[in-house]
Image (cartoon, coloured by chain):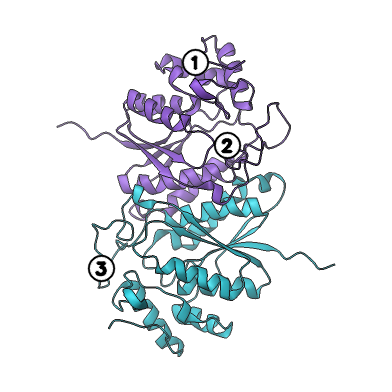
Chain colours: A purple, B cyan
Amino acid sequence: MALEKKKAVVLVSGGLDSTTVLAIAISQGYECHTLSFDYGQRHRAELVAADQVSQSMGAIEHKVMALDLKTIGGSALTDDTIDIPEEARDGIPVTYVPARNTIFLSIALGWAEVLGANDIFIGVNAVDYSGYPDCRPDYITAYEKMAKLATKASIEGDTLRIQTPLIDLSKAEIIQQGNALGVDYSQTMSCYQMYDQGLACGKCDSCRLRQQGFIEAGVTDPTKYMV
Amino acid sequence: MALEKKKAVVLVSGGLDSTTVLAIAISQGYECHTLSFDYGQRHRAELVAADQVSQSMGAIEHKVMALDLKTIGGSALTDDTIDIPEEARDGIPVTYVPARNTIFLSIALGWAEVLGANDIFIGVNAVDYSGYPDCRPDYITAYEKMAKLATKASIEGDTLRIQTPLIDLSKAEIIQQGNALGVDYSQTMSCYQMYDQGLACGKCDSCRLRQQGFIEAGVTDPTKYMV
């Protein structure tokens, strides 16, 4: 009789980081259930990318949960009245979505409980993290501690792990790791703006980190940029 | 010049507990922004009640966020194929919604950050908590610790408090406290089933706790029950 595979919920955005995380989780033998959010982001291309990578990489299922973060606003990513900056700035960027990782992890936690999964994978990164508070290791540790107490599983003696395999990696190291695992980065997208015909802007924080990462990794960047 | 009132996000369900929490937060001088979720619950009457109590008690605004927890399923409250039990049972009841408080608090946290509020009020209760893991004091403590690290405010030196004024109170004590603050409990509803014309079933866990609470509090129960 075949052993049952251990289950994991993997948060996928269609971007470079979370796609690499999915490749890592699959390489570690997890049965992966991927989760994305339709949270009022400016363009749909990332949800399409999330679905494509989930299917092509062998996730068991991909769910998209509708979650209208425009209800609470407060970010350039969810509020059309705030412009996306085209140059790097100090401090926490306007693309920060208040409590986003906390919200996403919490819904993943609910789904993990329904599935009987003890592992949640998220592509947070403390190196190239753009100043987002909810990408810091201390935050993840505190989240995991909370999550262990939050669920029925905890009462029944199960555990819960928040897995962050990218947390200490540079963008170049992430790309090298994904490349070694056969990730097709042409399926992923990082741009905050994203133009028609799959063109990335090449100017936003996210595009700049991505371009620099491929250069430092010594891997050809398959992204099509406007500039 | 008048001092600016301190802001709070108050989670309101339209039920007895959260309505009492709102009365407490208002009595403590908070400018209250109330938040409810349209999360696929079986009936809409509780959202109507949440709106009514928010308005009549003087909340600044009431937001209802759509959040389709049916996407992840796993509870009698969000899955029509699971029946609501009519008798008390041991263990965690089927009306438990996986990670619900974690999810609700996380969205409240995002809104609190947008508003510049340092306080989130939630009506969890560790006495009559029906065996829900996310009503335990240890869980709330862990959540607060995580929340302090999760937001931009934390980087800027602000704090964040999860306020649970009911956590150690019996249902009777909650009712007595709300009664003293002038809460009109006829506007609230607790029933998991809820029939037409505002009739509560009188049989589910929630109805039983409510009925018993009014009896023990020595306060007249304004609820209309089927039985």
- The lab-note entry on whether marks 2 and 3 share a chain reads no
Tell which subunit mark 2 falls on. Answer: A
In the rendered image, which residue does mark 1 sit on?
Answer: A176
Q: CA distance from mark 2 to mark 3?
A: 41 Å
Q: Are marks 1 and 2 on the same chain?
A: yes
Residue designated by label 2:
A135
Q: Chain of mark 3?
A: B
Q: Quadrant of the N terminus of chain A?
A: top left
Query: Which numbered tag is attached to residue B85?
Result: 3
Which residue does the image show at 59% across and 75% down from the upper left?
A: B57
* Above or below A112: residue B104: below
- On whether disc 3 and disc 1 are found on a single subunit, the reply is no
Q: Chain of mark 1?
A: A
Label 3 residue SS = loop
Residue sticking out furthest to the right: B1
Task: State if disc 1 and disc 3 touch (CB < 8 Å).
Answer: no
